[in-house]
Image (cartoon, rainbow, N blue to C red):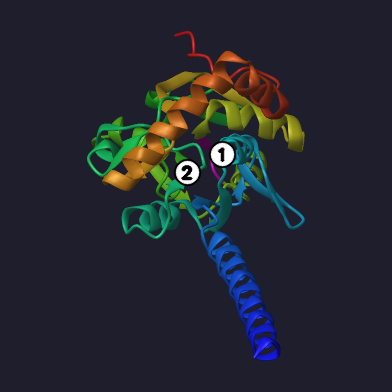
Amino acid sequence: MKKHKGILAITLGLSLLLAACGSGGEQAASGAQEEKVLRVGATGQSYPFAYKEGEKLQGFDVEVAETIAAKLGYKIEWHLAEFSGVMGQLETGRIDTVANQVAVTDERKQKFNFSQTYAYAGTQIIVKNDNNDIHSVADLKGKTVGAVLGSNHTKNLQKQDPNNEINIRTYETQEGTLNDVAYGRIDAYINGRSVLLAQIEKTGLPLKLAGDPITYEEVAFPFPKDEKHDQLRTEFDKVLTELRDNGTLKQLSEKYFKADVTAPIQK
């Protein structure tokens, strides 16, 4: 009888041990499944905001997003597409936000909620450096001007051309537009002031800014309008305040622009 009791005790002990191991394994698997993933859209072709160098995605907006995600315990899952496609993915809920210099506009606020501002942009005209005829939107009448399809800079130009007197040629990405201006295939190109300054320095092309920005805008992270993303937006705002206060935003800006684009533009 004692022998049977001993065998029973050993068997029961092994069962409890296996059950404990199994429970631990299930908990580990459950923990792995609960990894927080943040789906973020970008073009991967917007220097110096969100661009690829080799296989690595980098840029000012990319680093800001990655810094926030790390502090909140998220792993970023990047979704790359042209700008209009990225915004479409956000609208249909396929991604959580966009890190690609999204300007805050009344039209976009009808569809999305925005984080606090983390950068400031001005829609700027750029021309070949021997062009002394274009200084403002009024000088673009009858000219061909390049602009990125779906960008807010394109819409800003269209708003100031109600009679369609400017021939706006849209491009899927920024690549090629600068060369088209430099070699005289188009008269001007319109984009954000900060990105144009960075591109002129990087490419060394014979280009210059023409006049002052035609509009001034705030840049922020857009989120779908629902309870889940309102909570995420609140978390983003908390970290953005921290990054502004400790100087991280300014440091990242100076890394990519050699200037502080996180401070309001002086008009």
Question: Residue 65: which disc?
Answer: 1
Q: Position of residue 34 (x, y in %)?
A: 51, 58
Residue placed under numbered mark 2 in the picture:
147
* Callout 1 amino acid: Ala
Label 1, secondary structure: give it: helix
Q: Magenta-highlighted stretch: main secondary structure?
A: strand
Q: Is residue 46 above or below residue 211?
A: below
For the point 66% across and 18% down, the residue is 259
**Does label 1 or label 2 sit earlier along the sequence?**
1
Q: Quadrant of the C terminus?
A: top left
Q: Which residues are magenta?
A: 186-190
- Name the mark nearer the viewer: 1 or 2: 1
Question: Residue 98: which disc?
Answer: none
Label 2, secondary structure: give it: strand
Q: Position of residue 224 (x, y in %)?
A: 32, 47
For the point 37% across and 24% down, the residue is 138
The question of residue 128 being in magenta is answered with: no
